[in-house]
Amino acid sequence: MPRTRSPGLELPLDLPGWGARRRALEEALRAAIRAGRLVAGTRLPSSRDLAGQLGLSRGTVTQAYEQLVAEGWLTSVQGSGTRVAERGAEPAGPRAAALPPAAPRHDLRPGRRDAQSFPLDAWARAMRHALREAPSDAFGDGDPRGRIELRTTLAAYLGRVRGVRADPAHVVVCSGYTQALGLLAEAFAGLGVRTAGMEDPAIGDHVRLLGHHVKVADVPVDAAGPRVDALEAAGAQVAVCTPAHQFPLGTSMSAERRSALLAWADEHLGWIVEDDYDGEYRYDRHPIAALQSRRPSRIVYAGSTSKTLGPAVRVGWVVCPPPLLEPLVEAKRRARQFSPLDQLALARMLDTGDYDRHLRTARRGYRRRRDLLAGAVRARLPRARLRGIEAGLHALLELPPGLSEAEAVAALRAASVEASPLGDYVRGDRDRHPPSLVVGYAAPLAHAYPAAVEALVQAIARPGSRPAGPPTIRA
């Protein structure tokens, strides 16, 4: 029986119907490389395959490849085929733009986590189970609220660990908190909400996202939490807040402020959006139950895996009161969908306890990191102080008197350290807060973290000078 040859790589090219075919092929390949359609390292089809695709002789393709190899457009190595070369053959002209700055050696920006701490084995087991057991409807459009398996498991999990009162029917799965906030803003606008209060300081992207749909009122945050009097003065109908661990100040909303916020919601029929983005990480005590547990009829609870599993798993959730469900689901229906397999895998991790085990491990590791940072500040920066509760993945470093945020940032950059000035998140009066840095202690790899802390304290202790000597901080 004759042996059939399976087709190889495809390479769609438009060749003109006139002139020398070899030259036309050469120019088509050059144009594809110039335009970026064929990037460096791309493997090209064999001469036999490309000849069959384009209706040319194999010799024509071979000669074209050889010419482009000679010019430097392609490379050809025995056993690895023909590939696009790292650089084109055209002489380099003037640079269109400056090269991007080099990445900092020590990344202490907030909002990041150690990528190596991802529970790869547990996730692989969960994903294999999801692929093996997924029902056929998991590969269709499905319910815009998300897979029922995850919604059911999430409702039980959130009730167990955060005290959230959730009916799986009122859980909407999304791709993270950012999408959740956008969907909620769209739903609120559809219900006639005109003004929403947002904590000040807060993440600027979230403020701008909310502002696409409703007017945003700045609500100053003090040591007890968002100022309810400012919320009332703005005539807000929605309050977006972080009761467990405020970003970036690192405070927890006091019991008195929680009661005042609930009273505002009851009196004005206002909605509260509770962002519980890192509520799982409390190191000095058991976490306080979510605010939603006290008023599930007026509070929307939102969370995600961004601080537990990281950006590799894009899953978030909204637990919403019944009156908000229909407009929220309609907004979700119009939004971009995402992989149901991630939802099924996360549900499996929750069911088997792998998610809890991962969190316990992560909690111990991040607590050690915060303790190391706090000890270094006490020992080496006596005129600075670490503010905020012992929780989350960031801390607020109040700078020594006389040192501005701009001077501190410049000193850190000279030492190849990156941290965020508090002023980047403040929208109102910056004088309400002393000059401070928002230090994220989760991003550096575990073995590199002590050196990052050493570089930080050296730069703050001696702004304008280079770090001297080997690291003295040990994990």
Image (spheres, rainbow, N blue to C red):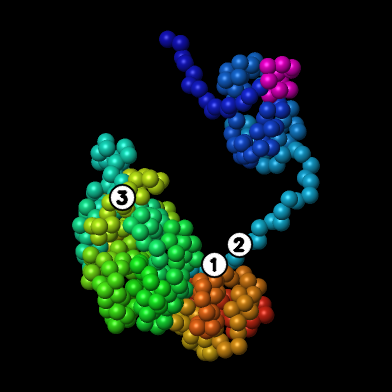
Magenta segment includes 18? yes
Which residue lies under the disc numbered 3?
A: 329
- Amino acid carrying label 2: it is Ala
Relative depth, front residue between 190 and 182: 190
Q: Few, some or many C-alpha atoms within 10 Å of disc 1 (few <14, some 14-19, many ≥20)?
A: many
On the image, the x and y values in percent for residue 1 come to 42, 10
Residue for badge 2:
103
Residue range in magenta is: 16-25
Q: Secondary structure at mark 2?
A: loop
Mark nearest the camera among 3 and 2 is 3
Q: Is residue 133 above or below residue 332?
A: above
In this rendering, position of residue 23 left or right of residue 398: right
Check disc 1 and give the amino acid type: Asp
Judge left or right: residue 365 versus residue 31: left
Q: Which residue is mark 1?
A: 107
Q: Is residue 426 magenta?
A: no
